[in-house]
Image (cartoon, rainbow, N blue to C red):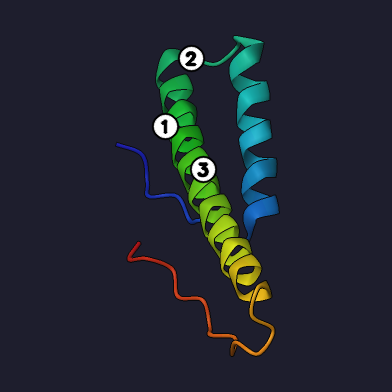
Amino acid sequence: MPKKAVPPANFEAALGELEQIVTRLESGDLPLEEALNEFERGVQLARQGQQTLQQAEQRVQILLENDNDPDAPLAPFTPEAE
């Protein structure tokens, strides 16, 4: 079983790593076990990226909803349990 991968520092780093994984997988030069490990890591990165984008969308939604009431106080965003 592969070691637990350290999550990338930010969304852009995760996206860059995911692009590299896709390139390696598309090359077709990886042994099966390594390809499976790369695929697994890619799925993790894709899920992490999707979660990050959903949180960003929620933050934008909150800001747009508060735009209807300019006197509404801004509250800090707290993501759902991860």
Query: Is label 2 or label 3 in front?
Result: 3
Secondary structure type for disc 2: loop
Residue occupying the far top of the picture: 28
Secondary structure type for disc 1: helix
Q: Which amino acid type is shown beneath numbered disc 3?
A: Leu
Q: Which amino acid type is shown beneath numbered disc 2?
A: Pro
Q: Is residue 43 above or below residue 48?
A: above
Q: Is residue 2 above or below residue 74?
A: above
Q: Which mark is residue 31?
A: 2
Q: Mark 1: few, some, or many residues within 10 Å (few <14, many ≥20)?
A: few
The residue at 58%/66% (across/down) is 59
Q: Are marks 1 and 3 in contact (CB under 8 Å)?
A: no
Q: CA distance from mark 2 to mark 3?
A: 21 Å
Mark nearer the N terminus (2 vs 1): 2
Residue occupying the far left of the picture: 1
The residue at 68%/23% (across/down) is 23
Query: Is label 1 or label 3 in front?
Result: 3
| Residue 67 image point, x, y percent | 68, 73
Query: Is label 2 or label 1 in front?
Result: 1
Q: Which residue is mark 1?
A: 40
Q: Which mark is residue 45?
A: 3
Mark nearer the N terminus (2 vs 3): 2
On-image quarter of the N terminus:
top left
Q: CA distance from mark 1 to mark 3?
A: 9 Å
Comparing 19 with 74, the one in front is 74
